[in-house]
Image (tube, rainbow, N blue to C red):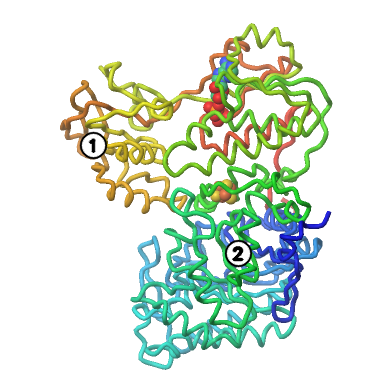
């Protein structure tokens, strides 16, 4: 089916130097948690994007040489012919669907610690690495020459691997950025001083790359549209540089200087198309095509970027993870089927934790190769009826997939509205976009007559038995504990009164304590700070207490930690780190230092406990007894009722159960992407 004419511009081909993108959908380089270690997993995931209609599909950061080794974070590599062979697997899968493949050649400079290779990292001068207690080696002229040779050789290998677009990457704090940085670059030779001198290495690498790839590949530069702050590269200098170098690349892939705060920020802090103004300013300075990101999920916003001349290509990382088939859905006019990214950065966190990509909205992400899951297609089932109790993310996902597989599904929920925790949490400050998890699935269910939903229906075990479904999935969720038990307290806090103690469930259901409120965060993610924001804005005097050394420590992995702590400070929330709540009497809380055990009290009329959750599995237990589910009973629990975790886990759990329903015996084990030593 043709795209609606108002979206046609998104499907016009575009020449990028010597190659032509088939449309304007461009998956910019993004971390995958797979890198060089999981080549089949990576190839299948990138290939799926091409199948879904992305006209250009790029790798993540791809190291050119062992002096740029980011272990423990997974990075791609083009160090030798083995890497060429592995990445050729990706380019083949991308080309099979008519898309172009891009590779982001990368040298981390001082930023990387080289934990695996044990080589000193190299930098414009000796500087500490990002996290490890090691410093780089200052580059002299022979090191610069060596670096150019490595980059050139990697560009040749990129060409041999079949890439169509080769990146030069002087951004995000890496090696060529160090040379551009006014404060990092203290050289007095031809590579330091004036902007032209600081940009000399970048110019040389661009010329070398052209020599390496000839007219077979396009060259892209990933560059910050507003510089990196005056101490490094001012916006004016960044603009001058684009003018100075504009003849050399075929494409500018533009980002902004504030990576965590803006470019990669979550929907709690930044909304769609947030970079637009700054990119528009730079677009006027270049004659080359421009791609940039903005967590674009609305085709109207995308088309506006092209019409107003801000962008030539619609860049996306997260929207392409949440929905690899986003371009096809726009082309076929299936806009209501787009699975919109919610901006939670769980994808980013998985890379940060060294695990293959996962996504809250798209449970098949990262499972294309090892489980053979397709984001749009599921195999038909054996038929029969399924009762799902609980319409939270796990229940909704299971109903959606089972409906697609042809089962007759009844979905019941005690609440008057569907969505479970997603509905409740999306009403907290900054989490509105999370409702997309519910809305995407409800839209799917609307076109499935084989799925019926009954709200305001709390089912008992007898009712479940009487219903007589062939299969029962219990997706009844979890509740926040009211006794303080969690990571810090392995036993309940003694002597807690019933009045004045609240949990996130109470706040989400409308409790608004006034006066002095202490929030105890032993969960370390978004819930406690978001509640602090809610209550502080409503006028309460909020004290935030956490057992870790900073606010919302785990959100470091989603890139939100700094903005979260900043937000609480700006709202006047009192922050007490490295402390635990050890008591409460309705007038004050007892606190203890987690290091010394020293105790003290502070005034509080309300204590909000954000510690851990308890599965709401009473119904399940009543149905299966102490023995637990046996296969014949065909009753299983899914989502938070099975094991409380992130929304991403609940969606995955519902998806997996729905895919594997009726599979005889144990589900097939997931594939393992590794090489096996022959003869052992
Ligand atoms: P998950 O994240 O695992 O999907 P949620 O907590 O979001 O879990 O959703 C669980 C849902 O189950 C809630 O909407 C709740 O109203 C519903 N529920 C819990 N117990 C019952 C029951 N006995 N009958 C029907 N619905 C129930
Ligand atoms: Fe978007 Fe969250 Fe999925 Fe990442 S994990 S792509 S931010 S929905």
Give x and y (percent) for residue 70.
50, 63
Between 146 and 443, the one lying in front of the other is 443
Name the residue rendered at 64%, 71% in the picture.
312
Relative to 184, say whether 98 is above or below. above
Relative to 674, say whether 150 is above or below. below
Relative to 494, say whether 175 is above or below. below
**Mark positioned earlier in the residue sequence (2 or 1):** 2
Quadrant of res 585: top left
Give x and y (percent) for residue 468.
74, 11
Total number of numbered discs in the rendering: 2
Residue 532 as seen in the image, left or right of residue 351? left
Residue 534 as seen in the image, left or right of residue 401? left
Q: Residues within 10 Å of mark 2 (few under 14, many from 20)?
A: many
Q: Which mark is residue 29?
A: 2
Residue 160 seen in the figure: yes
Disc 2/disc 1 C-alpha distance (Å): 44 Å
Name the residue rendered at 64%, 44% in the picture.
362
Q: Residues within 10 Å of mark 1 (few under 14, many from 20)?
A: many
Residue reaching furthest to the bottom: 190
Give the residue pinned by disc 1. 541
Relative to 121, say whether 4 is above or below. above
């Amino acid at each position: 089916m043709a795209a609606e004419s108002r979206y046609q511009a998104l499907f016009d081909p575009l020449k990028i130097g010597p190659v032509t993108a088939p449309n304007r959908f461009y998956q910019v380089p993004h971390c995958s948690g797979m890198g060089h270690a999981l080549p089949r997993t990576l190839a299948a995931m990138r290939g799926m994007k091409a199948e879904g209609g992305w006209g250009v599909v790029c790798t993540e950061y791809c190291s050119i040489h062992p002096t740029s080794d980011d272990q423990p974070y997974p990075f791609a590599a083009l160090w030798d012919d083995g890497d060429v062979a592995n990445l050729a697997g990706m380019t083949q899968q991308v080309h099979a669907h008519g898309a172009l493949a891009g590779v982001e050649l990368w040298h981390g400079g001082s930023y990387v610690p080289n934990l695996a290779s044990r080589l000193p990292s190299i930098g414009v001068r000796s500087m500490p690495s990002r996290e490890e207690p090691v410093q780089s080696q200052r580059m002299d002229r022979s090191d610069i020459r060596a670096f150019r040779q490595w980059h050139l050789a990697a560009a040749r290998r990129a060409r041999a691997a079949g890439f169509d677009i080769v990146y030069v990457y002087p951004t995000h704090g890496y090696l060529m950025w160090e040379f551009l940085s006014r404060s990092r670059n203290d050289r007095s030779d031809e590579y330091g001083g004036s902007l032209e001198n600081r940009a000399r290495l970048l110019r040389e690498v661009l010329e070398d790359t052209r020599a390496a790839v000839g007219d077979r590949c396009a060259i892209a530069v990933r560059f910050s549209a507003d510089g990196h702050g005056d101490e490094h590269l001012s916006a004016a200098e960044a603009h001058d540089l684009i003018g100075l170098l504009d003849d050399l690349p075929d494409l500018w892939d533009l980002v902004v200087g504030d990576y965590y705060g803006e470019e990669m920020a979550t929907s709690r802090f930044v909304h769609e198309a947030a970079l637009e103004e700054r990119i528009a300013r730079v677009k006027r300075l270049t004659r080359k095509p421009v791609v940039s990101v903005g967590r674009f999920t609305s085709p109207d916003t995308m088309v506006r970027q092209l019409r107003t001349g801000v962008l030539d290509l619609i860049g996306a990382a997260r929207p392409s993870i949440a929905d690899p088939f986003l371009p096809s859905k726009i082309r076929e006019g299936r806009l209501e089927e787009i699975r919109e990214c919610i901006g939670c950065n769980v994808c980013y966190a998985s890379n940060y934790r060294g695990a293959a990509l996962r996504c809250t909205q798209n449970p098949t992400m990262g499972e294309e190769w090892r489980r053979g899951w397709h984001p749009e297609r599921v195999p038909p089932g054996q038929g029969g009826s399924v009762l799902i109790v609980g319409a939270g993310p796990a229940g909704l996902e299971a109903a959606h997939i089972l409906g697609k597989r042809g089962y007759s599904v009844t979905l019941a929920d005690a609440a008057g509205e569907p969505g479970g925790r997603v509905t409740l949490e999306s009403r907290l400050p900054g989490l509105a976009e999370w409702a997309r998890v519910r809305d995407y699935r409800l839209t799917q269910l609307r076109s499935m007559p084989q799925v019926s939903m009954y709200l305001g229906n709390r089912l008992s075990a007898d009712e479940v038995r009487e219903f007589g479904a062939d299969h029962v999935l219990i997706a009844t969720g979890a509740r926040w504990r009211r006794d303080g038990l969690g990571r810090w307290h392995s036993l309940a806090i003694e002597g807690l009164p019933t009045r004045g103690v609240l949990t996130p469930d109470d706040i989400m259901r409308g409790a608004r304590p006034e006066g002095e409120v202490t929030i105890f965060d032993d969960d370390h993610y978004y819930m406690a700070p978001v509640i602090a924001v809610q209550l502080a804005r409503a006028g309460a005097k909020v004290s935030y207490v956490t057992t870790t050394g900073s606010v919302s420590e785990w959100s470091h992995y989603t890139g939100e930690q700094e903005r979260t702590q900043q937000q609480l400070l700006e709202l006047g929330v009192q922050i007490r780190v490295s402390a635990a709540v050890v008591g409460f009497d309705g007038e004050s809380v007892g606190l203890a230092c987690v290091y010394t055990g020293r105790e003290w009290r502070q005034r509080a009329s309300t204590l909000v406990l954000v510690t851990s959750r308890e599965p709401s599995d009473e119904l399940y237990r009543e149905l299966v007894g102490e023995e637990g589910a046996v296969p014949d009973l065909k009753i299983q629990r899914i989502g938070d009722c099975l094991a409380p975790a992130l929304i991403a886990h609940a969606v995955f759990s519902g998806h997996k159960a729905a895919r594997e329903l009726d599979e005889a015996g144990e589900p097939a084990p997931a594939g393992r992407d590794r090489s096996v030593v022959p003869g052992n």
